[in-house]
Amino acid sequence: MSKVLLLALLGAAAVLGASAESLSAGGRRSLLQRSGAFPDPEFPFCRCDARMRASPYRLKVDSNITYGGQSWLCFKVTVNLASATLCNVTGPTRPKCCDEDMAKIEFNIDAQCVKDTNNALLFYGVNTTILGKTYSPVVTVISGDVDKDDSSKAVLRISSSELKMPQAVASEMTKRIGGVPVCFNVRRNRQCATLQDYFKNPQAYAQYAIFNSDKKCCPTGVTGSTNIPPGPVTQSPPPPLVPVAQKPPSPPSPAPPAVSPPPPPPRAPGGPFPYCNCDTRSGSSNPWRATIANKTMVTTSGRTGERVCLRLFIDADASRACNALPATAFKCCKTPLHKIELRADNTNCKSSVGPGQLTGHGKDVPVTWDSSTPVLKFTNLAIPIERAAAGPVFLCFQFKGPSCTRLTDMCTNGICRAAVFESASNTCCPPFDVK
Ligand SMILES: *[C@@H]1O[C@H](CO)[C@@H](O)[C@H](O)[C@H]1NC(C)=O
Ligand SMILES: *[C@@H]1O[C@H](CO)[C@@H](O)[C@H](O)[C@H]1NC(C)=O
Ligand SMILES: *[C@@H]1O[C@H](CO)[C@@H](O)[C@H](O)[C@H]1NC(C)=O
Ligand SMILES: *[C@@H]1O[C@H](CO)[C@@H](O)[C@H](O)[C@H]1NC(C)=O
């Protein structure tokens, strides 16, 4: 059983690596998981480059420690450009992810463990200044999300602002102390205490993804702990790792360190690990929706095809639900509509769709097709939410053939899976059906 899981994990890692050639630069991660049929519950697909070979960031299991009266499971993020084999070139073919910063780490954990950790400890054992910034141990609040499509899976995120650093800093820390120390705590008397528990396999192979600030890079790998060094079992301070004074960790106390509010309610990540780079796909996170207003056959410049008008509107129920979300939730209740994507079930429609027009907003919006997935996108819409309240907004586009002349050619039964986006940050991107 464990062997099977391990093989599955390693197989997944191998496939992710092997898929590199078939992904264009900056391509979406998806090949592994998206082999299934349409409609695809994972839509909108992740927009991040998960290739290890296109990024120098790696994670390795480090040790387990105690600090500030808590137990911690620790890792180190290393920067190793030599292992990023696609980064051995300069110029335009160099993958963008070779030179990115670090902003977030995600772990693919067992959903049963999601409440058993609530703090991250960064820079344990570090007290040093790199590129003008001083790094020393810091404890921050973290939380995990149970996957809404598979309640046994969860993602634990460390996205604390303190973690965000230029690659040069991570690189320097790798040189000096073998990596950027990152730990998560193990709350007392909880079900999950070991890496084996968290990652649900006896070898404690952990699947992780390391994101850059714009979330376009998410090198995803598996790290093992079979050779996990025995961590200090008492509160004795670790040997100084850097050649500067090392203050021993604060003495043990029953109270956890400074920050420990209850974790925010789980948010649904959706999609395959590391899930979408959207922070949330929850329908209540973003109230913008679209519906088909009308479809008419028209002939322009001798080409006949359907002109489709979508009505873009604010869904009142979603809006209410959004406003009722807790302050800690990812939500985009009042943001403009930045982008709408329609999934093309028929990839042959690619050159059959003309540009779109936003009526009542007075501008043409170009149609773009995603470079690696059959998705039709209308970007940079910038429709303020107040505009939707002032009256209907329509987005019209026209099929002009030759492959596709009607909406039913592109989307099964003429119902397109769609998603709305609040900005280029992809914070809230709920999917829904356009009917
Ligand atoms: C870069 O690495 C790849 C993969 O290892 C190899 O195929 C390629 O020849 C290398 N290119 C250069 C310029 O070294
Ligand atoms: C920490 O390491 C010790 C020594 O290897 C081991 O006995 C213990 O189970 C580990 N604890 C966790 C939480 O992994
Ligand atoms: C870090 O080092 C500086 C001087 O090198 C020292 O003054 C400071 O107390 C140290 N801080 C910690 C947390 O060890
Ligand atoms: C379809 O809807 C748009 C937007 O309201 C409108 O401008 C257009 O006249 C409609 N077309 C037809 C054929 O009704």
Image (spheres, rainbow, N blue to C red):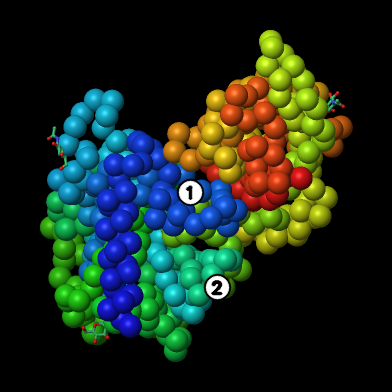
* Residue at the image point whose x is 45% and y is 54% from the top: 35
Asked if residue 113 lies left or right of residue 393, the reply is left
Q: Quadrant of residue 234?
A: bottom left
Q: Residues within 10 Å of mark 1 (few under 14, many from 20)?
A: many
Question: For this rendering, which residue is in front, 208 or 73?
Answer: 208
Residue 71 placement (x, y as % from top left): 34, 79
* Residue at the image point whose x is 77% and y is 20% from the top: 298
Q: Quadrant of residue 376?
A: top right
The numbered dot on residue 151 is 2
Residue 266 placement (x, y as % from top left): 58, 67
Q: Secondary structure at mark 2?
A: loop
Q: Earlier in the sequence, mark 1 or mark 2?
A: 1
As displayed, is residue 253 above or below residue 182? below
Residue 402 placement (x, y as % from top left): 60, 24
Question: Label 2 sits on what residue type?
Answer: Ser
* Residue at the image point whose x is 66% and y is 46% from the top: 412
Image quadrant containing the C terminus: top right
Q: Which residue is mark 1?
A: 46
As displayed, is residue 139 above or below residue 195? above
Residue 302 placement (x, y as % from top left): 69, 12
